[in-house]
Image: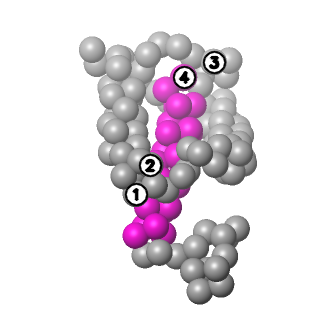
Amino acid sequence: MRHLSYLFVLAGCLVAALWLEPVLKVNVLRRWRRLLLTLVPVVVVFVLWDLAAIAAGHWTFDPEQTTGVVFPGGLPLDEVLFFLVVPVCAVLGFEAVRAVLRRPAGDEPARDER
């Protein structure tokens, strides 16, 4: 069970953040193109960064706490999922705060302009 530790933490992050989508109607998942444009640069930069750190011997992963699925270069699947899950949770949190404060998103007119 310890080999799923990383995945359990990621699942906990998602559970803690996904309720914001339907309850506060933040529409993060509905605007999937915008989310994808946010995720792609994050994933690319941090995957390359991790691969460089692994190759230099500066970064390792405990195989007892990961699934064992490892991509070329020594990057575990769990770490790649981290680069997807954490930004999604951050965007959900940011959009939830924006929704509660009733602040418009960058592509929406302000309430007094409608």
Q: Earlier in the sequence, mark 4 or mark 1?
A: 1
Q: Nearer the viewer, residue 111 or 1?
A: 111
State how far apart marks 3 and 4 are (Cα).
7 Å
Name which of mark 3 and mark 1 comes first in the sequence: 1
Amino acid type, mark 2: Glu
In terms of depth relative to the viewer, which is nearer, 103 or 44? 103
Secondary structure of the residue carrying tag 2 is helix
* Mark before the other along the chain sequence, 3 or 4: 3
Residue at the image point whose x is 35% and y is 17% from the top: 3
Mark 1 and mark 2: Cα distance apart in space: 6 Å
- In this picture, is 82 found above or below 23? above
- Residue occupying the point 54% across, 23% down: 77
Give the side of residue 61 with respect to residue 23, left or right.
right
Q: Is residue 100 left or right of residue 103?
A: left
Earlier sequence position, callout 2 versus callout 3: 2
The label nearer to you, 2 versus 3, is 2
- Cα–Cα span, label 4 and label 1: 31 Å
Residue picked out by circle 1: 24
